[in-house]
């Protein structure tokens, strides 16, 4: 993997594979106005959160990290920020502006609490920003500018046999060429920790991996649930996965075989190149949002029986090695990896083909998820609001 | 389509006790799989759906089950070679009503 792609070079050195206008509503009161602006400007991407006040402690820190992370994702070229909470919103605006991105803030207080006025001003400001973004050009970028995340949703044994090892090949290629790669879903390291620990660059990283899995399993225990039926879930079980250990041993193959340089929290940005782990929830909408807030430009998403969920900001390439799924979900699966289990192809051939598709997608080729507007981003919650 | 597959079933490691069906396997049929220098031939006992696991050897109850060289759980009842291995006869370390249930318990 020595060739590169064409992307949008940002002032802060990151490179976008898309050039989105992000309409970001950071308070529940401004969400409907943000959605109205989005309807008037269908090229823009809209993220809203129903929360906005009384979000404290760890939740407050998570909220700041996620919202700012979405705004500063390399794929975002400009931001229209809507809020009913002036001091916080002004701080967000200043932090976003420091990355060199154009940002316009619309506050309820500046519009006499009139959300129709906010909508009118927002459509006009957004139209100007979209016009400006459409005039920016892609320019050559290298593999070292890529930060990819990997996810598996609705796995089956074909994921662990073929699709995840395939994604692992891409992980190894990206990281050996100076790029970044990240894998999360902490619970799905359980039973496979020994493999991850062996790849950790230091004893501290190995201990952090074990501790993260321990915390997640204690959380499951404290909640009083049956883990079987939740993870693995009914779809996994019907498809042939029996235990969480079996699922995890397949899942971790997405991270490849190279060194694991560190562990970050949900939505936290890795501090350098290499393969990273993110300590985070396993459910795809939360998991993908964590990757996107941490700066990932694209997601490689493997599935067994199928999973339509995509990131809003990061093109999500759906990969399956299940022969039935690839035949059935022709407008969901972007990459048919079932050839790995057939005699007429091989892991090597499919790796070459997926590499080409990743770089084409980075340069602007659309995924089915983008074509069908499947995307969404969410801010996870931990505790109760005030 | 089946003829194009690399095999009817895959075994991933010489120490494994299961193979993964790449096609639906029918009770009564004969299955041969191999990896490295090891080879197994079993008569299929249960109908086994595509991508599900089949036991390659007779396993007593409470025996570790290996796939890909790693332990994925432990049998809860004796399992015959050729039988379907799934949630009815295999459990991992898991959490039932908030209480840990180790596969070794």
Image: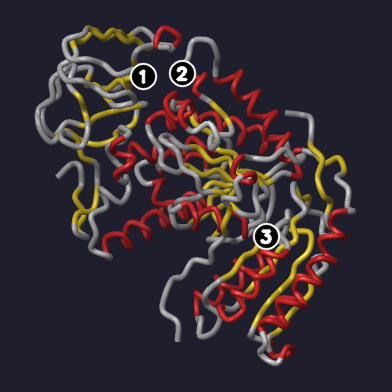
Is there a contact, CB below 8 Å, between mark 1 and mark 2? Answer: yes
User: Could you say whether the residue bearing mark 1 is in a helix, strand or loop?
Assistant: loop
Viewer can see residue A218? yes
Chain ID, mark 1: B
Q: Which of the two residues, A2 or A207, is positioned nearer the viewer here?
A: A2
Q: Which residue is mark 1?
A: B22
User: Could you say whether the residue bearing mark 3 is in a helix, strand or loop?
Assistant: strand
In the shown orientation, is residue A282 left or right of residue A353?
left
Question: Residue, x 20% and y 37% (percent of image)?
Answer: B87
Query: Where is A266 relative to A277, above or below?
Result: below
- Between the C-alphas of marks 1 and 2, the distance is 8 Å
Using the image, tell me which numbered label, if any, was put on residue A45. 3
Is there a contact, CB below 8 Å, between mark 2 and mark 3? Answer: no
Question: Residue, x 27% and y 65% (percent of image)?
Answer: A222
Which quadrant of the view contains residue A271? bottom right
Query: Where is A140 relative to B33, above or below?
Result: below
Q: Which residue is mark 2?
A: A341
Quarter occupied by the C terminus of chain B: top left
Q: Are marks 3 and 1 on the same chain?
A: no
Q: Position of residue A266 (x, y in %)?
A: 53, 61
- Between the C-alphas of marks 3 and 1, the distance is 41 Å
Question: Residue, x 13% and y 20% (percent of image)?
Answer: B80
Viewer can see residue A256? no
Q: Are marks 1 and 2 on the same chain?
A: no
User: Could you say whether the residue bearing mark 2 is in a helix, strand or loop?
Assistant: helix
Which callout, 2 or 3, points at the residue further toward the start of the chain? 3
Quarter occupied by the N terminus of chain B: top left
């Amino acid at each position: 993997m020595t060739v590169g792609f064409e992307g949008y070079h940002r002032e802060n050195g990151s490179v976008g594979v898309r050039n989105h206008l992000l309409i970001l509503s950071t308070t529940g009161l401004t969400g409907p106005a943000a959605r109205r602006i989005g309807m008037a400007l269908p090229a823009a991407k809209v993220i809203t959160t129903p929360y906005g006040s009384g979000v404290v402690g760890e939740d407050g820190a998570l909220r700041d990290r996620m919202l700012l992370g979405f705004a500063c994702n390399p794929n975002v070229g400009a931001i229209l920020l809507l809020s009913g909470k002036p001091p916080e919103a002004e701080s967000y605006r200043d932090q976003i502006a420091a990355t060199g991105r154009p940002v316009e803030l619309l506050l309820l207080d500046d519009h006499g609490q009139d959300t129709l006025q906010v909508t009118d001003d927002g459509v006009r400001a957004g139209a100007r920003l979209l016009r400006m973004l459409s005039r920016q050009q892609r320019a050559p970028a290298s593999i070292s500018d890529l930060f990819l995340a990997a996810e598996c949703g609705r796995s089956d044994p074909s994921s662990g046999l073929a699709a995840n090892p395939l994604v692992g090949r891409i992980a190894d290629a990206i990281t050996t060429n100076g790029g970044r790669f990240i894998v999360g879903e902490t619970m799905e390291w359980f039973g496979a920790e020994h493999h991850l620990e062996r790849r950790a660059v230091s004893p501290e990283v190995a201990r952090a991996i074990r501790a993260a899995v321990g915390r997640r399993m204690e959380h499951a225990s404290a909640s009083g649930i049956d883990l079987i039926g939740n993870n693995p879930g009914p779809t996994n079980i019907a498809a042939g996965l029996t235990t969480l250990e079996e699922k995890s041993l397949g899942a971790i193959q997405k991270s490849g075989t190279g060194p694991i340089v560190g562990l970050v929290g949900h939505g936290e940005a890795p501090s350098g190149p290499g393969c990273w782990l993110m300590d985070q929830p396993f459910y795809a909408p939360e998991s993908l949002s964590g990757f996107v807030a941490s700066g990932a430009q694209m997601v490689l998403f493997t599935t067994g029986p199928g999973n339509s969920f995509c990131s809003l900001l990061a093109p999500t390439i759906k990969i399956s090695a299940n022969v039935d799924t690839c035949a059935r979900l022709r407008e969901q699966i972007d990459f048919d990896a079932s050839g790995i289990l057939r005699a007429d192809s091989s892991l090597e051939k499919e790796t070459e083909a997926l590499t080409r598709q990743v770089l084409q997608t980075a340069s602007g080729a659309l995924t089915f998820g983008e074509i069908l507007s499947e995307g969404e981003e969410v801010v996870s919650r931990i505790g109760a609001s005030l | 389509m089946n003829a194009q597959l690399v095999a009817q079933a895959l075994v991933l490691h010489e120490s494994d006790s299961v193979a993964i069906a790449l096609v639906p396997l029918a009770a009564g049929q004969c299955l041969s799989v191999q990896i490295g220098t090891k080879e197994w031939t079993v008569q299929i006992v249960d109908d086994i759906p595509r991508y599900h696991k089949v036991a390659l050897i007779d396993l007593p109850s409470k025996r570790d089950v290996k796939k890909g060289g790693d332990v994925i759980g432990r049998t809860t009842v004796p399992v015959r070679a050729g039988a379907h291995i799934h949630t009815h006869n295999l459990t991992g370390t898991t959490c039932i009503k908030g209480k840990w249930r180790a596969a070794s318990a």
